[in-house]
Amino acid sequence: MDFPRLLTSAQIKELDQRAIREGGVSGFELMDRAAARVVEAICQRWEGLEGLEVAVLCGKGNNGGDGFAAGRLLHRAGVGVRVFLAARREEIGGDARRHLEQMEQAGLPALPLIAEADLPALDQALAGADLAMDALLGTGSRGAPRPEMAQIIERLGRAGRPVVAVDLPSGLEADTGQVPGVCARAVLTVTFGLPKIGQLFFPGKEYCGTLVVADIGLPDPAPSPEAVHLISGEGVARLIPRRAPQAHKGSCGLVVVVAGSEGMSGAAALAADSALLAGAGKVILGVPSSLHDILEVKLTEVMTKALPELRRRRCLSLRAQGEILSLLAGARCLALGPGLGRHRETGELVRRLLGRVEVPVVLDADGLNAFAGRADKLKGVSAPLVLTPHLGEFARLAGMGVEEVGMDLLGVARRFAGAHRLVLVLKGAPTVVALADGRVLVNPTGNPGMATAGAGDVLTGLIAGLIAQGVAPEEAACAGVYVHGLAGDLARDQQGEWGMKAGDLSRALPRALVEAAGRS
């Protein structure tokens, strides 16, 4: 899989140094390139530069140097620019100082912003500006901004002007996405080389606005067995299966879905139907026998199979094992868990099945709950596994608290996937995919409207449908979460976030697949 890297602040600093050391480019020139990309992004967003008034706020580091260079370029293009320096002049050194001096030589002074008496001039400039540029704090910033800087960022927010952040909004931690204090809220963030981890995780993602990744000629990062990647449209396009001209339902794969219990027939229906909408040639849905007639009415194209149940509980019994194994003859994937219920006998059925199944398994919902506190039993499963828990399900599975998982989500996901030799799809905002080899991938698609019952069942069916068509489980997981989020975005654009239901996501899957396949 070919997906771009997500970097930490230390890694991006190393790329800067390598570009200077090995690429024959100076730090001064890198700042010039970064500034040019910022100006280009402004020109595109505001459909030209003519008539714009811009307030540029610069700090003392390299981020400020980018701001000085951008201010000079805007000034040269005829834009009305006022530049403010939130540091003492003698604190500016290196390439940033050279850009400050070059800007001033071009006739654009840096106005001081270090004392209380300087703030009214900033307020006046912001009031008359069409937009503000935030070049105060760079990727190396940690913790809450110091009080003097926080005051400036607060005034920037109160001015109500659109903010363009240089590399990332000031106050955002590049490595975590955390906002420990006040933070600039940008409508547009122009980041350089590759995205930073904190730009994809909330709350940081919300402060970035539209994220533009600008090429300034940095080298590729060194390979790492524990790299973090961004699932991209271009990479997903190469994973979407294409049908041969002579394709038939048999060549497109059979998915067996085992799901449902009393009150949760909808989960079974959503997962099974989504597997078909993902392109599987045939889907067989096994359900408790008393729900069979209900699913026959709910579903037209999905084949259904009545399985032995615990009659008083209307959930699957251990006696269903043999019939499920028979259904799997010729199948390419088993989707197991949506709406199964938590009866102890059903849980035992799930555990025994995984001991005998050989085709890839997408394990979700109550299939996961069957292993809560027993995750070590997953290590003995020979079938390729894709687990799709939300944060609460994963915490129960791993025997951890939800907050504990959230404090080191990437690390926890990586360690779990590696220890159990499986693919872990940890659903959330954003969804994270962890692979057994140590790689972790972050999904950029999706929206809050997808926070609706049944959305996870759609994802289960989608991943299973892709696997049935010959996509490797780890690739199906990555493509599945991207297409699932894209379907949510298409549904939101059509009807808004408030009224979205899981069925809307499922119906949008074909359009999402077409769009994703065309992004190569």
Image (cartoon, grey):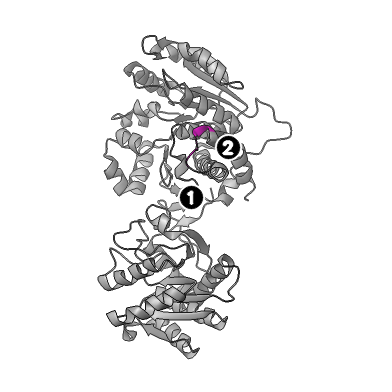
Tag 1 or tag 2, which sits nearer the N-term? 1
Closer to the camera, 265 or 99?
265
Closer to the camera, 376 or 487?
487
Q: How crowded is mark 1: few (under 14 residues within 10 Å), some or many (20 or more)?
A: many
Amino acid on which the number 2 mark rests in the picture: Leu
Residue 37 position, x and y percent, is 54, 70
Closer to the camera, 125 or 97?
125
Amino acid on which the number 1 mark rests in the picture: Pro
Please name the residue that numbered disc 1 is placed on. Answer: 444
Residue 157 position, x and y percent, is 38, 66
The numbered mark at residue 509 is: 2
Write the start and end of the magenta stretch as one range.
498-503
Majority secondary structure in the magenta region:
loop
Number of dots carrying numbers: 2
Whole-angstrom CA distance, mark 2 to mark 1, is 17 Å
- Picture layout, residue 285 above or below residue 380: above
The numbered mark at residue 397 is: none
Residue at 60% x, 68% y is 47
Closer to the camera, 80 or 317?
80
Is any atom of residue 312 visible in this view?
yes
Residue at 46% x, 76% y is 128
Residue at 34% x, 16% y is 345
- Picture layout, residue 393 above or below residue 69: above
**Is there CB contact under 8 Å for labels 2 and 1?**
no
Secondary structure of residue under mark 1: loop
Quadrant of residue 46 in the image? bottom right
Secondary structure of residue under mark 2: helix
Residue 291 position, x and y percent, is 47, 14
Query: In this image, 73 relative to 439: left or right?
Result: right
Q: Residues within 10 Å of mark 2 (few under 14, many from 20)?
A: many
Query: In this image, 491 relative to 181: left or right?
Result: right
